[in-house]
Amino acid sequence: MPRLRLTGRGLWITVLIVPPLAFVALFIVYPIISAFAYAFFEWKGMARGQFVGFDNFYKVLFAPPYASYTWNAFRNNVMVFFALMVLQNGVGFLLAYCLWRGLPGARFHRIAVFLPVVLSTIIVGYMFKLFYHPLFGVVNISLKSVGLGALAQPWLGQDTTALWSLVVANAWHMVGFPALVFLAGMQRIPGEILDAVRMETESEWVKISKVVWPLVAPSATVVFVLLFVGAFNWFEIPYVMAGLDGSPYGSTDVLGLLFYRTAFGTVSSSTQNFGMGSALAVLIFLFIAAVASVITVKLRAREIEL
Amino acid sequence: MAQLSLRGIKKRFRNVEVLHGIDLDIGDREFVVFVGPSGCGKSTLLRLIAGLDPISDGEFQLNGRTMNAVPPSRRGIAMVFQSYALYPHMDVYENMAFGARLMGLDKAEVEARIAEAARMLRLEPLLKRKPRELSGGQRQRVAIGRALVRKPQVLLLDEPLSNLDAALRSDVRLEIAKLHRDIGGTTIYVTHDQVEAMTLADRIVVMNLGRIEQVGSPRDLYQTPANTFVATFIGSPRMALLEVEREGDALALPGAGSVTLPRLPGPEHGRLTLGVRPDAMRLRRDASANGYAATVIYTEYLGDNAYVYARLGDGTLVSVRTGPDESYEPDTPVHVEIALEGAHFFSRETGQRLSA
């Protein structure tokens, strides 16, 4: 090992690396580790009680009534993940393909598609809450104006539509991100390869499924993993649009909301419980880390060098 | 059977016209080479024939059927791209099978065609490899194989040798010539290399600035170039163009004296352009020779012969082929003699050939 001299280059490297490392250690690593520790104790408000082993984990996973909340929220997260996979990544891919093939207006839409991504989630949430308003929301008014008034409904007020309404809002907000990543992936495909496919078929479906899609696989890995992490950490949109309780009737409850409610308490439902909240946070973290690693490894294997 | 007919083909990109009306007929089993400098429109023309870009104006017929609106995959045309454009995620077999399956061929037929192409192109040991595991020459053969399994009526090749090193280039050139003979389809080949054009073509189409300058066999183009562009483009080293003044049988070159050549074409008096290839000139040391005064610049020794570069009195640089044993020191004053049978005459104004 060469000794790191604190002069010139070595000094620069030290100065540039130590502060961010310290920052990450203090605000990310330490809280994660302390959350692990908190999860093994009984808490009375802010006061730490006895060491209780895996008691908190057992409660959130298996003991009524907490277990039913957890599994309900988890089920909703899973549905959100698959719905966003289709609605956000699927539409994002198709948008990217249209932009790439240079359909009329592609230059304008390349920017337009990405614009919502830079909006604050809070703004998007409130905006869509207004859109979905049962009386003067633009969705119901539009439906009525084209004679489909029978389809108008309180989108956020009934458990059959609430979660999907949130999914649509999220997809609209974030669709520009997968579109941009996929577009970048497509632009890496050499033009002559597309020409070569065109010499062999005119079917857009064959071009997409057999050539374009396999070749953008590297971008897909990033997009899938980020969507997975995002879907299971989902918080802002449901918090803003449906509230901390995941109303109506827990139909929009997700793990993020449940964790927040459990750890910090709400006006309506519960007092704060750091132990169970930390246990939930640890479980969410482990689940996301494990599955995201598996997805990454599996998808990496499919990637192709151009 | 494949007969192509191009009538008044124009191509515009936005407001810029890059092909100004191409008329060309290509016969069955013909090997035609489009040659010209970069930007002359040869690759554009090939892409129009392939259908990859739309034709702005004019008509393209294949076997009497208008093809302007037919998508590329239905024209019965296959193309080999400059970068080979193999599908990176498919192995060699799949690369070749992909297009064949899309034609609706059954499994046995696809396998038979691939086996045949693989045998012809010596690809059998490579069938399970991915393109990135192949050398340039091997990729090239796969790209050709992929085109062949579709049994196209017309095979298009866009500068297929430009990504290969010099040694491989002449081997692959030979293979392409042999392949064309064995398969017997119509082949159109684009290159900027006149040696490739001369060695491969039945007919060469020389293009410049979006127009066809001349169409003819390699021999035609070399022996009777239609204009000064073709004259200087075909042949290496280039033909020298001398801006001479004609007075009867005498051709005067300012500052270099006068040469007498009998039976000249064109008008008795006036300015014309005299074109001479390196092999139609001889160097003389004595001042009485019937040649232009020049000064030797340097000599390129090539083993079986040598090229002497000399500057004529008017400043024109000419290269003269000499025997390998003749040697001329730089700055030697010489006279350049011109063989009548190797002299070409062009109009000074239009650059067109003056016929005898």
Image: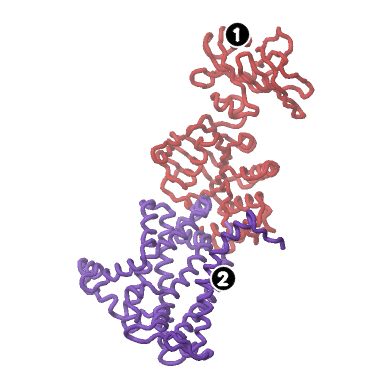
Residue A97 to residue A144: above or below = above
Left or right relative to B41: residue A244: left
| Chain on which label 2 sits | A
Say which residue appears at 57% left-offset and 64% top-offset.
Answer: A18
Residue A304 to residue A33: above or below = above
Any idea which chain is the red one in this picture? B
Residue A78 in percent (x, y) is at 44, 78
Q: Residues within 10 Å of mark 1 (few under 14, many from 20)?
A: some
Contact check, label 1 and label 2, Cβ < 8 Å: no
| A260 and A124: which is toward the camera | A260
Left or right relative to B29: residue A158: left
Looking at the image, is mark 1 or mark 2 nearer the viewer? 2
Secondary structure beneath disc 1?
Answer: strand
Q: Mark 2 = which residue?
A: A298
Say which residue appears at 65% left-offset and 27% top-offset.
Answer: B237
Say which residue appears at 65% left-offset and 62% top-offset.
Answer: B128
Color used for chain A? purple
Tag shown at residue B250: 1
Q: Give, as a three-letter code, the residue at label 2.
A: Lys
Residue B89 in percent (x, y) is at 57, 60
Residue B212 to residue B94: above or below = above
| Chain on which label 1 sits | B
Say which quarter of the image contains residue B29.
top right
- Which residue occupies the extreme bottom position in the image? A64
